[in-house]
Amino acid sequence: MGIGTVTFMGSGELTPTLGKVHRAVMSRIAGPVRAVFLDTPAGFQLNVDLLAARAKEYFRRSLDTELHVISFKARTGVTEAEMEAVLRRLEGANYLFAGPGSPTYAIRQWQGTSVMSALRRRLAVGGHLVFASAATIAMSRHALPVYEIYKVGADVYWAEGLDLLGPYGLELAIIPHWNNSEGGNHDTRFCFMGAPRLAQLEAQLPATATVLGIDEYTACIIDLATGRAEVMGNGQVTIRRYGREGFFQAGSVFELARLGKMSESWAPAELTGNSADEAAAAVMETGEDCWVDPGELVDLLVWIRAQLREAKEWSLADAVRDRLTKLGIVIEDGRAGSIWRRGRSDG
């Protein structure tokens, strides 16, 4: 059995539109579908059991599939027997679903627990993980604290996420509700952040990170085995990396290289028994270039040069351009930004 898939939904996880997504993911499962719903992201809400019941009824009515609810509302107060029951049901599932609630609450409850380890293992051995809204954000490396910023008024910052795809070489900041328009007379795009706050947030990201924006009623199915992602639903997926932006409409398929360099030979540490540092060292010792793609290095240098130009550090920006020219990389500046190509400069 090979590696499974991860599906991120922007919103609308219990609507007819994304029912097609659930069915598409289930169609990849050979044999009976063993679906579970993990209620943790909404575990602090008084109506969490109602949300779970709605999900269960939706799967029964719309997908003709029995959905078993795994209740893990909080990590505190869980007995050893209760934890064993949660893990047993997780390990027996091949379709794992979690959705709305609070991203930072979900992170606090799952971070460093056997539950998160179980989710990683299920993915690595062929399980299909489906996350919506808050759960989607929680699985990021750089997680957006929506409530803290939008509702409480905290200064913009990124929380440390669960980094589900980090072991596979992807450093993501996943933002659902990308095209939200609920604000009416004020900007609530980008998961209620609006353009000004998004700009501040992106300025805080390391250059190695990729922003993956997912429209509402839209899903991105990431197939780690094939190295491709498929977009389904009503909207599009937006990728922002090194100051560049790309769009993929529903019905599109794109290579995961768009999100970063995949690490093909690094299995999650939970499966190997090694620490993350040991696993990374093992990859490096092979002598294979699993981490850095030359084109991505050039992208990064071109992005750095753009930042230097914006800061009016003209001499340093020119030095970067000149060194790249000597290496056979030509930078062409235009109104839409800078692009590069291999070849000789006309100058």
Image: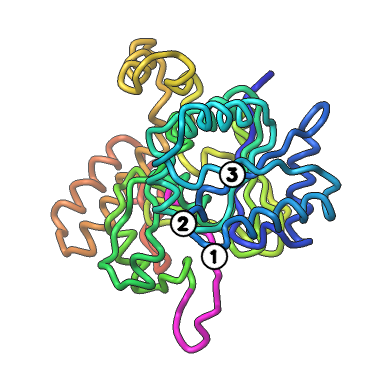
Of pointers 3 and 2, the one earlier in the residue sequence: 3
Disc 3 marks a residue whose amino acid type is Leu
In this picture, residue 241 sits left or right of residue 347: right
Please state the extent of the stretch shown in magenta in the rendering. Answer: 172-188
In this picture, residue 146 sits left or right of residue 347: right
Disc 2 marks a residue whose amino acid type is Phe
Whether residue 204 appears in magenta in the rendering, the answer is no
Q: Which residue is mark 3?
A: 38
Between 84 and 207, the one lying in front of the other is 84
Q: Which mark is residue 177?
A: 1
Q: Which mark is residue 272?
A: none
Question: Residue at the spot x=58%, y=53% of the render?
Answer: 99
Percent position of residue 15, x then y: 74, 62
Q: Residue furthest bottom?
A: 185
Total marks drawn?
A: 3
Q: Which residue is mark 2?
A: 44
What main secondary structure does the magenta stretch of the protein show? loop
30 lies above or below 19? above
Q: Tell me the CA gap for discs 1 and 2.
A: 22 Å
